[in-house]
Amino acid sequence: MKNTIPPMTDPDGKNWPQPPTDNILIDDHHALMTQSDFNQLIDYSHSVPSGVYPGKMWKTTAQGGRKFLWWFGELPGHDDICTNNRREILIVEDRLK
């Protein structure tokens, strides 16, 4: 489950813009996404978003230009605790173009 972004089901997430989780491929080190999906993520390079609930995603840019996907996950067996996860973003070409 460490490479899975849970669905964002919290009512507070209804106004949080982000791409569908099934558009993003995640392994132990990277998150692959299109430029379009990347552009939908809110940038929190200098802070952390308020409102913690599973499935919430955002992006950051580190010094040197590396970009990261962050998301709140679920801690198995603990409904009230979220994990904080990140993967380096790799932009892939949209095959529909």
Image: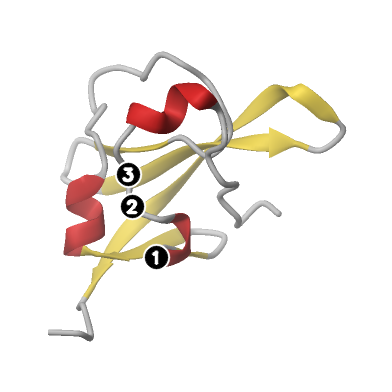
At label 1, counting other C-alpha atoms closer than 10 Å, the crowd grade (few under 14, some 14-19, many 20 or more) is few
Residue 81: x, y in percent? 71, 22
Please say if 61 is above or below 90: above
**Among numbered discs 3 and 1, the one appearing first in the sequence:** 3
Q: Residue at x 52, y 20 (%)?
A: 52
Whether pointer 3 and pointer 2 mark residues with C-beta atoms closer than 8 Å, the reply is yes
Residue situated in front as seen by the camera: 96 or 63: 96
Residue 2: x, y in percent? 66, 51
Query: From mark 3 to mark 1, how far is it between C-alphas?
Result: 11 Å
Q: Which amino acid does label 3 sit on?
A: Gln
Is residue 38 rendered to the left or right of residue 33?
A: left
Please say if 97 is above or below 77: below
* Residue marked by disc 1: 23
Q: Residue at x 54, y 65 (%)?
A: 27
How many circles with numbers are drawn on the protein?
Answer: 3
Query: From mark 3 to mark 2, how far is it between C-alphas?
Result: 4 Å
Residue 19 numbered tag: 2
Q: Which amino acid does label 1 sit on?
A: Asn
Q: Which residue lies furthest to the right in this view?
A: 77
* Residue marked by disc 3: 18
Q: Residue at x 29, y 17 (%)?
A: 47
Quadrant holding the C terminus: bottom left
Residue situated in front as seen by the camera: 65 or 89: 89
Label 3 secondary element: loop
Whether pointer 1 and pointer 2 mark residues with C-beta atoms closer than 8 Å, the reply is yes
Residue 67: x, y in percent? 26, 47
Residue 57: x, y in percent? 41, 39
Query: From mark 1 to mark 2, how far is it between C-alphas?
Result: 7 Å
